[in-house]
Image (cartoon, helix red, strand yellow):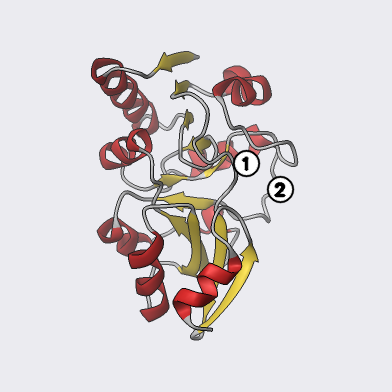
Amino acid sequence: MTLFKCGSEKADREAVLSAAEEVAAGKLVVYPTETVYGIGADIYNDVAVKNVYMVKKRPFDMPLSVAVSDKKMMEKVAVLDENADILIKEFLPGPLTIIIKKQADISDIVTSSSQKVGIRIPDHPIAQDLIKHTGPIIATSANLHSKFDAVNINMAMGDLGDRISTYIDAGSSPLGEPSTIVWLMDGQVEIIRQGAISADRIREVIKC
């Protein structure tokens, strides 16, 4: 288990490059986002994804979300529609997870056999840089299932310990609350979880 403390350009770079190597090797890392700390793993490595479920003690019928660095990478994971384009333009990068049809090559282990995938673009420089090096990674909170979301590295380490290969400590999460989750289906919009972005703000933008 390795802990990196961010705070300088050199330290940030070292943390990101080391964590990216671990993800490429099929390991799990904990990384900061603007909402809460997340567990990262290569979404195309089924063994690594299964390990995320087991480390969190998360039921396998609860799908995992995916983090990407930009819209272009998002299109490799999900099939975007007009409402998705509107939400991306207005809120991403930011604390919004969009549930929408997945691309065919996204493993069922990620989505619990659903044809939909939850996806977002974190608004955090460390997360952004990491994902640019790794490609799409898992974006689930760095805590044991049903426990409090980790808003600092100590909370994450207390829950997950040495089952994580690399931890990146960038201080307390700026927002300290999870993303809002929106499900887009057949032109309709459903708020699954209200988080940092209000349901009213989503409806205002989508005009629903």
Q: Is residue 24 above or below residue 7?
A: below
Tell me, yes or no, whether the two marked residues, 2 and 1, touch with CB atoms within 8 Å.
yes
Classify mark 1: helix, strand or loop: helix
Residue identified by numbered label 2: 59
* Kind of residue at badge 1: Tyr
State the separation of the CA atoms marked 2 and 1. 7 Å
Q: Quadrant of the C terminus?
A: bottom right
Q: Earlier in the sequence, mark 2 or mark 1?
A: 1
Task: Sort mark 1 into few (<14), some (14-19) or many (20+) by Cα contacts within 10 Å.
Answer: many
Name the image quarter holding residue 132: top left
Q: Is residue 190 above or below residue 49?
A: below
Residue sitting at x 69%, y 43%: 58
Residue sitting at x 48%, y 70%: 100
Label drawn at residue 106: none
Q: Horizontally, is 32 left or right of 135 in the view? A: right
Work out whether residue 84 or residue 26 is closer to the camera in this orientation and state it: 84
Name the image quarter holding residue 158: top right
Q: Horizontally, is 128 left or right of 52 in the view? A: left
* Kind of residue at badge 2: Pro
Q: Is residue 22 above or below residue 79?
A: above
Q: Can you give x and y, in whole percent of width and height, for residue 60 in the image?
A: 67, 50
Q: Horizontally, is 123 left or right of 108 in the view? A: left
Work out whether residue 145 or residue 203 is closer to the camera in this orientation and state it: 203
Work out whether residue 206 or residue 29 is closer to the camera in this orientation and state it: 206
Q: Can you give x and y, in whole percent of width and height, for residue 186 in the image?
A: 51, 85
Residue identified by numbered label 1: 53
Residue sitting at x 48%, y 85%: 187
Q: Can you give x and y, in whole percent of width and height, for residue 102 in the image?
A: 44, 67
Work out whether residue 72 or residue 8 is closer to the camera in this orientation and state it: 8
